[in-house]
């Protein structure tokens, strides 16, 4: 090790992943992830919700800041996102980067490098998983985009969150729309429970 580096890169075979189940699922070893003391890349991966929203986003919703998107944050070779569920378990899920099982990958935005170490990041991920229960999900106020923005702030991303990713949800936060939004979301959850 030279005098200028704080720590040699190491391979951490104990780092865990669970495709789609995130903080609450069974984990499996992910060999070969290189851990560095600093300079770990952060990526925001943006997805179209489906083929219809992809067409609408391309047609002009994105350029009007009214797009319909899902997103996740990649750090240490895994992508973290927030999803709805009907329990107090963590709503944070983990997948391979750019590989969401439902939404269509659109693009990635480089968010710079975190000054945090891999150990610090792992601790923040654990804390984050505990503070985002799946039942707290709301498609307007507490969604995957809001999670990604807050997670990147927690990870000390040097770059500002791209506001266009908030899209239509940002307009839905208007006070006068809240009763309608809440009623619609309650109805959607009720329908999901019955299916």
Image: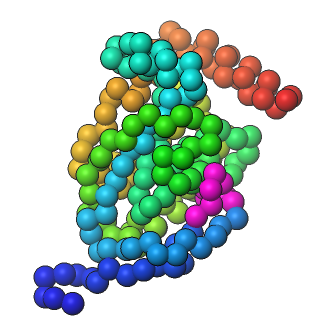
On the rendered structure, is 139 left or right of 119?
right
149 to 19, vertically: above or below: above
User: Is 11 colored magenta in this rendering?
Assistant: no
Question: What scheme was used to colour the molecule?
Answer: rainbow
The magenta segment is 17-25
Residue 33 percent coordinates (x, y):
44, 72
Residue 139 percent coordinates (x, y):
57, 28
Residue 9 percent coordinates (x, y):
32, 80
Q: Residue furthest right?
A: 194
Quadrant location, the N terminus: bottom left
On the rendered structure, is 20 left or right of 107?
right
89 to 15, vertically: above or below: above
Residue 100: in sight, yes or no?
yes
Quadrant location, the C terminus: top right
Q: Residue at x 31, y 58 (%)?
A: 41
Q: Nearer the viewer, residue 31 or 126?
A: 31
Q: Residue at x 53, y 20 (%)?
A: 53
145 to 52, vertically: above or below: below
Q: Residue furthest left?
A: 4
65 to 94, vertically: above or below: above
Q: Residue furthest top?
A: 176
Q: Residue at x 24, y 45 (%)?
A: 159
Residue 143 percent coordinates (x, y):
53, 34
On the image, which quarter does residue 137 sit in? top right
On the image, which quarter does residue 86 sit in? top right
């Amino acid at each position: 090790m030279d005098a200028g580096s704080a720590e040699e890169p190491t391979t951490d075979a104990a780092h865990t992943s669970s495709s789609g189940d995130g903080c609450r699922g069974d984990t499996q070893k992910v060999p070969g992830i290189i851990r560095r003391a600093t300079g770990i890349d952060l990526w925001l991966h943006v997805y179209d919700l489906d083929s219809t929203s992809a067409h609408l986003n391309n047609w002009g919703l994105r350029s009007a800041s009214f797009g319909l998107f899902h997103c996740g944050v990649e750090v240490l070779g895994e992508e973290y996102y927030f999803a709805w569920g009907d329990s107090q378990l963590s709503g944070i899920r983990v997948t391979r980067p750019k590989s969401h099982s439902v939404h269509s990958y659109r693009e990635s935005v480089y968010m710079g490098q975190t000054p945090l170490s891999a150990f610090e990041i792992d601790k923040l991920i654990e804390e984050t998983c505990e503070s985002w229960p799946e039942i707290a999900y709301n498609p307007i106020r507490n969604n995957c985009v809001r999670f990604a923005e807050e997670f990147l702030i927690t990870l000390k991303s040097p770059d500002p969150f791209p506001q266009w990713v908030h899209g239509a949800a940002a307009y839905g936060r208007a006070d006068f729309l809240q009763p309608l939004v809440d009623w619609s979301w309650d109805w959607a959850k009720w329908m999901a429970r019955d299916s």
